[in-house]
Image (cartoon, rainbow, N blue to C red):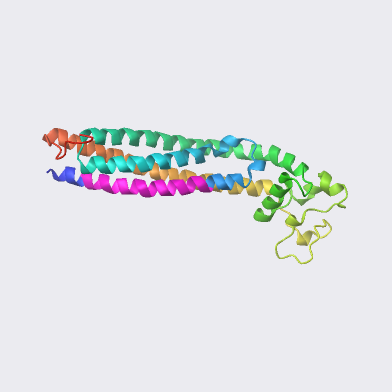
Amino acid sequence: MDCGVITSKTVLILLSLIFWAAAAGLGYVGVYVINSYRNYDHFLEDKYTMLPAVIIISIAVVMFIIGLIGCCATIKESRVGLGVFLFLLLIIFIAEVAAFVMGFVYRGKIRPDLDKSMTQVFQKYDAKNPESRAVDFLQNQLKCCGVNNSTDWERIPWSNGTRNNSVPSSCCKHNAVNCTGSLAEPTKLNTEGCEEKLDHWLQHVLSYASLVILGFAIVKFFGMFSVCVITCRKKDNGYEPLYSGTFA
């Protein structure tokens, strides 16, 4: 058997194993991104910002199937199976490139979306409704207060109604003692706005997801190259597969 064919087969089997590991990794990334966005979905008016995460999970499922096909086709030395493997690799490669591009496209849409939707959600705050719970969760997790800063609460009905210009307790610093949320005690409050912090955090999540997608896209490229090498060497050398059953 040609040494180049043996090397290519070894590479393809290793890549099949990598695809399974990558499928698990991508699945984790996709779920992580979706859960991250769900925690703040009250502030995201454009739900299509979750599309890259959905694509990532879909890619993970297909990658597992591709790894299975690639492993079987390589072991059985099936030209047809390798052709199917190459075709699927090409499709998944295109999908990953599309997800990578969309991740960067949506990065530019996050801030305008947040500015409008966050203001609307904060205005509905009454310490009881689902929007209020989302606001408290946001301010607790990101250690922020208000949309742009803590003084935003002076223009929110909940604060300037019966609350005597105070802010929710979720604005209090975690180490603050006897914090009542009074704007007269700014040293006990987180004063930074939530919009900038949430935008920065979501940008970080998308950047992380995009880098993972790019890395796996590079792996797919080498996989397609290896399939081309093994099929071309078999054709040029007149090498016939040892197995002629399924995929043959």
Name the residue rendered at 77%, 45% in the picture: 125
Say whether residue 223 is left or right of residue 106: left
Q: Residue at x 50, y 35 (%)?
A: 102
Horizontal side, residue 30 vs residue 158: left or right = left
Q: Residue 204's spot in the image, x, y percent?
A: 55, 48
Residue 48 versus residue 11 in the image, above or below: above
Q: Residue furthest front?
A: 245
For residue 213, what is the image quadrant? top left
Q: Residue at x 35, y 40 (%)?
A: 65
Q: Quadrant of the N terminus?
A: top left
Vertical comparison of 22 with 78: above or below: below
Q: Position of residue 75 (x, y in %)?
A: 22, 44
113 and 137: which one is in front? 137
Where residue 230 appears, x then y in whole percent?
20, 39
The image shows a total of numbered marks equal to 0
Residue 143 visible (yes or no): no
Residue 136 visible in this rendered orientation of the protein: yes
Q: Quadrant of residue 186?
A: bottom right
Q: Please identify the quadrant where the C terminus is shown.
A: top left
Residue drawn where x is 80% and y is 57% of the image: 181
- Residue 162 image position (x, y, % from top left): 88, 50
Magenta residues, dominant SS class: helix
Q: Is residue 36 within the magenta segment?
A: no
Membership of 20 in magenta stretch: yes
Question: What range is drawn magenta here?
Answer: 8-32
